Image (spheres, rainbow, N blue to C red):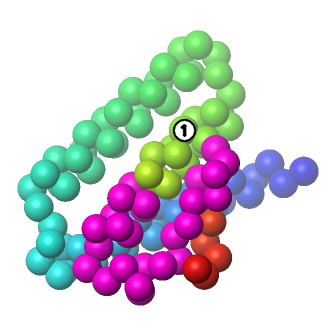
Amino acid sequence: MFYWCPMLSLPVEALQVIELRLRLLAAGKGTPDEIFLVVNEKIDALAEARNILIRSGAPAEILDNHRKIIAASALRLSETGPNTQMMGLWRTNGTSKGVSFAPA
């Protein structure tokens, strides 16, 4: 019914992960390993998107893949972040759609 909704919510989810990363860096807890991991995640996501397109996959598959990556990053960052109570907005909902933005 709302096939465009995941496409619109993906940038919002990505921006929240960026916020978590910036908070970590501002708190002095960012490490070179984290930055290396960010770059590797981007390269891996691009390679996976390319593979999905090569095997004639649907664009929705690419969106789902990116949402999984973003959800994993959000969960990892919210557990290791400088202020976990402030970042309690992230809860996985157990689906391939990734993360729920409802308050905890």
Residue 81 belongs to the span the image colors magenta:
yes
Whether 34 is drawn above or below 39: the answer is below
Residue 103 locus on image (x, y percent): 60, 81
Residue 39 locus on image (x, y percent): 24, 45
Residue 8 belongs to the span the image colors magenta:
no
Residue displayed at 49% across by 30% down: 49
Q: How many marks?
A: 1
Report whether residue 7 is seen.
Answer: no
Label 1, on which residue?
Answer: 65
Residue displayed at 80% across by 48% down: 3
Whether 48 is drawn above or below 43: the answer is above
Query: Looking at the rendering, which quadrant does residue 17 occupy?
Result: bottom left
In this rendering, position of residue 42 left or right of residue 66? left
State which quarter of the image contains the C terminus.
bottom right
Residue displayed at 57% across by 59% down: 92
Q: Residue furthest top?
A: 55
Report whether residue 23 is seen.
Answer: yes
Q: Secondary structure at mark 1?
A: helix
At label 1, the amino acid type is Asn
In this rendering, position of residue 86 left or right of residue 13? left
Residue displayed at 17% across by 81% down: 27
In this rendering, position of residue 71 left or right of residue 59? left
Boundaries of the magenta span: 73-99
Residue 71 locus on image (x, y percent): 49, 55
Q: Residues within 10 Å of mark 1 (few under 14, many from 20)?
A: some
Query: Looking at the rendering, which quadrant does residue 81 occupy?
Result: bottom left
Whether 56 is drawn above or below 16: the answer is above
Which of the two residues, 91 or 41, is positioned nearer the viewer here? 91
